[in-house]
Image (cartoon, coloured by chain):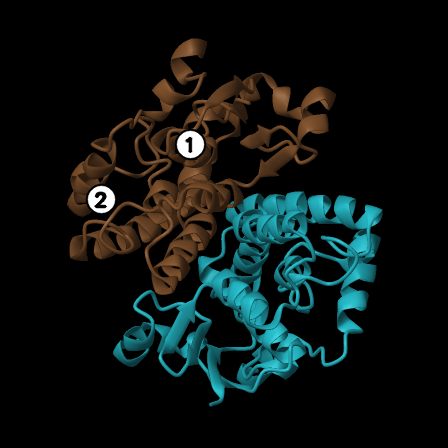
Chain colours: A cyan, B brown
Amino acid sequence: MTIKLYCFGESGNSYKAALPLELAGFDWEPVFVDFFNGEARTPDYRAINPMGEAPVFIDGDLKMTQSGVIQQWIIEQTGKFGGKTPEEEREVLRWQFWDNHKGSSQFGMTRFLMNFLPEKHRNADVIAFNVGRVKGALNVLESELTQRDWLVGSDVTMADLSCCSYLYYPEPFGFDRDDYPAISRWLDRIADLPGWKHPYDLMPGSPADRA
Amino acid sequence: MTIKLYCFGESGNSYKAALPLELAGFDWEPVFVDFFNGEARTPDYRAINPMGEAPVFIDGDLKMTQSGVIQQWIIEQTGKFGGKTPEEEREVLRWQFWDNHKGSSQFGMTRFLMNFLPEKHRNADVIAFNVGRVKGALNVLESELTQRDWLVGSDVTMADLSCCSYLYYPEPFGFDRDDYPAISRWLDRIADLPGWKHPYDLMPGSPADRA
């Protein structure tokens, strides 16, 4: 049976699930969530996910939310992207938590505030605060990636596929690849993986649709 | 050998590790990190954790950071707090990710901004933005806990021990127990567990020390 992933192109959290599904060769299809027209708040969508989140993963009776959980399930099912030793497994999980706590959580929120929130609701102080947190997280990644090609071990893992999730988007949120050369090379390394696609190519929906 | 947990009382992230270590009966001791006097930025502490985070867990050669990873290790070692079925295990992990993404990450940041950041650096708009996110997360918890006693299954799990971590603190951050009766009853339920201690009693360091 084909796995369904409720998702939309602008959602880096959805990309964290969609990208490893694609790279690992799963039979899956995206189901478009029209987030920007409020679909995530409709009763129909709340029946799928009471919290109104994306992504939602459905495979028969198995339903999962939170991209980190979906990523761990992919590791269990395939043995891919999880690290090669117990130490690496813990390091992968550590980066997934770090990313949800301090990384893409900030990237996604700041991108939303600077690009998708109606202009009349944007607040310069709030944006500056969030950009500060973005740069703090980027500095951590840059420092790590100056020392190694991948965040954990000698190959791509979910640590990379989680932390990269908002960093291919063109909309501004305080991240300019020219300022972070090690991150930029790492993003190229991920984009060179067989089957890689940009989030706007892998999932339906992009700002171009609403232009 | 006694487990060492580098931590400090004000850190709910440290409490997420310290509380289950205590409840599960581990032989452990806290090592005070003098965060508010900058110890986390010293070379000595960076040698322990290059990211300057707390908590850091050390058991002989095993060193771990990120409370979610330490919590998963405790589950593996003891079989406690992890849920009783594969579905419950995934639900526990989901709440741990949710908490790091949207729950205690917001509670902790907002409490910092409103109480520990020097007053001259506090910004009303930034605080209001963060309090809004706090209330969004609290509403999710209140809604869930209106329907059940524990976040996952029929007993306490790491889902509870993660999400509760900042909710016992007295400092204001937009959370008044009177406004969230289901959360308040759940916090009492956790506090009734044998061995439970308040974060300021379980770990060294509290605002009282600096008064």
Which image quarter: residue B92?
A: bottom left
Determine whether A188 is above or below B192 in the image.
below
**How many labels, in total?**
2
Residue B68's x, y, as percent? 49, 45
Kind of element beneath mark 2? helix
Q: Please determine if labels 2 and 1 lie on a single subunit.
A: yes
**Does residue B211 show up?**
no
Question: Which of the labelled discs sits on residue A106, or is there none?
Answer: none
Residue B99's x, y, as percent? 41, 49
Residue B125's x, y, as percent? 44, 42
User: What chain letter is assigned to the residue under label 1?
Assistant: B
Give the residue number, with chain letter if any, for mark 2: B183
Tag 2: residue type? Answer: Ile
User: What chain letter is assigned to the residue under label 2?
Assistant: B
Kind of element beneath mark 1? helix
Tag 1: residue type? Answer: Leu
| Distance (Cα) linking label 2 and label 1 | 23 Å
Q: Residue at x 39, y 58 (%)?
A: B89
Q: Residue at x 46, y 54 (%)?
A: B97
Give the residue number, with chain letter if any, for mark 1: B21
Q: Residue at x 60, y 44 (%)?
A: A133
Q: What crowding class fits label 1: few (fewer than 14 Cα within 10 Å), some (14-19), or many (20 or more)? A: some
Q: Quadrant of the N terminus of chain B?
A: top right
Which image quarter: residue B198?
A: top left
Sequence-first tag of 2 and 1: 1
Q: Residue at x 59, y 37 (%)?
A: B64
- Viewer-side residue, A36 vs B186: B186
**Does residue B93 show up?**
yes
